Image (cartoon, helix red, strand yellow):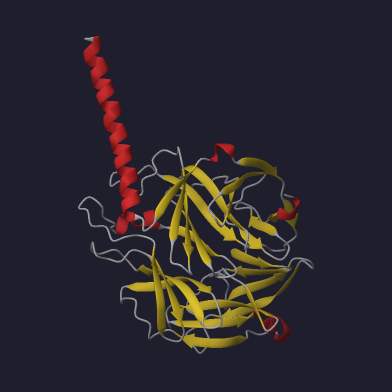
Amino acid sequence: MFMNVFKIIFFLIVMISFSACDNRNKDADYFNGKIVYINKDSVKVRDVTSKTIGVENYGYGMFSVYDSLIVFWNPRFADQFFCLYNVDTEEEIGYFCNKGRGNNEFLSVAPVSQFFKMDNDLKTPLCDFNKRKIYFWNISQSVLEKTTVYDTVISYDALNFGKNSIASNLFYQSDDTFLAMIKPLYFIEDDTPLPYYQKWRLPCETINDYHVYKKPEADDIHFDEAQKDRLYSFDAIKPDGSKIVQAMKIVPQINIIDTKTGEIVFYRLANVSRVSLFDPKRDDGCVYYRSIQADDNYIYATYWGNTWDVSLGSKCPFVRIIHVFNWHGEMLYELKTDRTFFRIALDQVRNRLYTSEPDSDEIYYIDLNEL
């Protein structure tokens, strides 16, 4: 009797092990590059303390920071999409980028995800996905003239990437080249293209494609409408434009895309259970990375690593871990914060990592120089 029970237990353990290995192999087969497993047991853990800044009448939504300037984005603003605020004077500068259907107006626009300097002016690219146009918003001149100033407006309507796809995550690379993620509006068939990056030379030339995923060919691997959340990532570009990093939501993994060579390497935390992206039975509700920022030396990604309650009325979890990587995919630090760091904004001038308290009006930051 005892031997029979032992055999059953042994058989179950072997089957579970094979199943786990099978899922890992599926991921290796369908990610378009090498998966490198990271053991974070030896990673340095640092406790960090945040500092608050004064912002009157906060409620501006998501934001990005450059030196003394905060660029707030909120679709609930009455007539514009962005509000500028001065960190040092703690004063509101004004509202910019008009809503509407007219000339140089937007029906919708994403938050600012990248700043760059050109001719000594601070600028950012904005994309109107409805009109298929790219704008260079000159922030410096907009502040001086107290009205929205666009230096350049370029149509990318001639670019062909599928009628059921849209361009998102727009990143400026050089004077006439951009990187954008091409993703389907919805998954309707097995041959629906999975999200990938495309490099453009504007106004209408496609230079290169960077496919993070291979096309699934096995019968047991599908990405339908209900499963597309598995592919969700939070993306940032290295300021010199040479690499893009993705922090994945459903697997504990960052993806680094080399925009020069096209090489893609996937760095995944080892010894973390339920990590297969392609397991058709997977529905554990685990969420791993929630936000990402990067400079020329480091990558900062906020990490949860637990189940996420998305039911009506649930509160945002207290995300208090930030993983710090270099651009070789090595995890250097695990920062443990004294307050919640959910969405983060990196100020590369003052080397600060900002966030806001989800349940209050406070904005605060970590001074990375002190690390």
Q: Image point 53% across, 77% down: which residue?
A: 126
Q: Image point 64% across, 70% down: which residue?
A: 71
Task: Give 287 or 78, whichever is nearer the viewer.
Answer: 287
Residue 294 lies, in percent from the top left, at 59, 60
| Quadrant assignment, res 165 | bottom left
Relative placement, left or right, of 2 versus 302 is: left
Residue sticking out furthest to the top: 1
| Quadrant assignment, res 193 | bottom left
Q: Image point 39% across, 61% down: which residue?
A: 212
Residue 182 lies, in percent from the top left, at 39, 70
| Quadrant assignment, res 181 | bottom left
Task: Give 328 or 301, whichever is nearer the viewer.
Answer: 328
Relative placement, left or right, of 123 versus 1 is: right
Q: Is residue 69 visible?
A: yes
Image label count: 0
Up-down relation of residue 80 to residue 31 (above or below): below
Task: Give 300 or 189, whichever is nearer the viewer.
Answer: 300
Residue 293 lies, in percent from the top left, at 58, 60
Residue sticking out furthest to the right: 89
Residue sticking out furthest to the front: 261
Q: Is residue 282 visible?
A: no
Q: Quadrant of the N terminus?
A: top left
Up-down relation of residue 328 to residue 274 (above or below): below
Residue 349 lies, in percent from the top left, at 71, 66
